[in-house]
Amino acid sequence: GEDVEQSLFLSVREGDSSVINCTYTDSSSTYLYWYKQEPGAGLQLLTYIFSNMDMKQDQRLTVLLNKKDKHLSLRIADTQTGDSAIYFCAEKDSNYQLIWGAGTKLIIKP
Amino acid sequence: DAGVIQSPRHEVTEMGQEVTLRCKPISGHDYLFWYRQTMMRGLELLIYFNNNVPIDDSGMPEDRFSAKMPNASFSTLKIQPSEPRDSAVYFCASSRTGSGANVLTFGAGSRLTVL
């Protein structure tokens, strides 16, 4: 079945850029998403990208999509302590349902 | 809008007891989802509704779990009897048809501990 994979942890220094990577298997994905989960809270949509795009930028966030390699990345510029969270990648599959990755915990070092 | 509202935020109960989790979706949203999150299994879709009708309950772990949506503004997830392995955070989320990207809005979750 469809699968979405991401590494479990990423540690970066405050002020550096963070790049969180995700791979997926469903070539018919229409949308791909990044959600953020802060401690004790639900998931919040950060951004999403339509499958016919290869890049989307929104302030400090840049999403890159490589459809050929089925690879999605989220870059956070100038990482701040408030960016500490778990970041989930998800794809909308051919049945219009979301397939979720396991989440990447972003750790910010001072 | 107040967003998706879940209650209770925390529930501690003893094995064998009945647990009822509640959710109020965003007004105008016609899809409602129940998810469970654990360290071991991550985020799991339990069941989802469209226009109050259950569409896919294949993620419901076993018969001890049941979900209802009696109207567009309320849903419940019931566990009877509860077991320690049901301890998790349960999220409700809603979305609206025609929004293209099918963006889900999540509630804050209900943290369940079964002793």
Image (cartoon, helix red, strand yellow):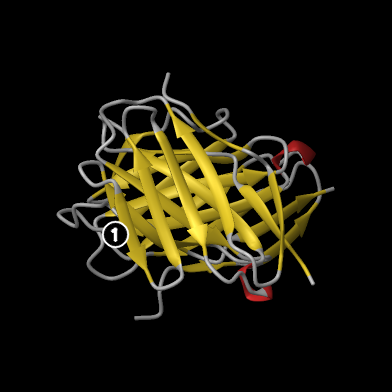
- Tell me what residue is drawn at x 70 percent, y 47 percent: A9
- Report how many numbered discs are placed on residues in the image: 1
Location of residue A54 with respect to B23 vertically, above or below: above
**Chain bearing mark 1:** B
Question: Which of B17 and A35 lies nearest the eye of the viewer?
Answer: A35
Q: Work out whether A98 lies above or below B14.
A: above
Quarter the C terminus of chain A occupies: bottom right
Q: Quick check: A45 left or right of B71?
A: right
- For image coordinates 58% across by 52% down, the residue present is B90
Tell me the quadrant of the picture where the N terminus of chain A can be found.
top left
Residue found farthest to the left? B98
> Where is residue B25 shown, x and y percent of the image?
37, 65
Name the spot of residue A10 as percent of width and height, x first.
Answer: 69, 50
> Can residue B105 be seen from the camera position used here?
no
Residue most extreme to the right: B115
- Amino acid under disc 1: Asn
Instruction: Locate residue B89 relative to residue B98 in the image: left or right.
Output: right
Please rate how many residues cluster around mark 1, counting C-alpha atoms within 10 Å: few if below 14, some from 14 to 19, many from 20.
few
Q: Residue at image x 22%, y 67%?
A: B28
Residue pictured at 80% horizontal, 43% vertical: B15
Q: Quadrant of residue B112?
A: bottom right
Residue A109: x, y in percent? 78, 66
Residue, far top:
A1
Q: Residue furthest bottom?
A: B1
B111 and A6: which one is in front?
Answer: A6
In the image, residue A47 sits, relative to residue A58, either above or below, namely above
Q: Secondary structure at mark 1?
A: strand
The answer to which of A108 and B83 lies nearer the viewer is A108
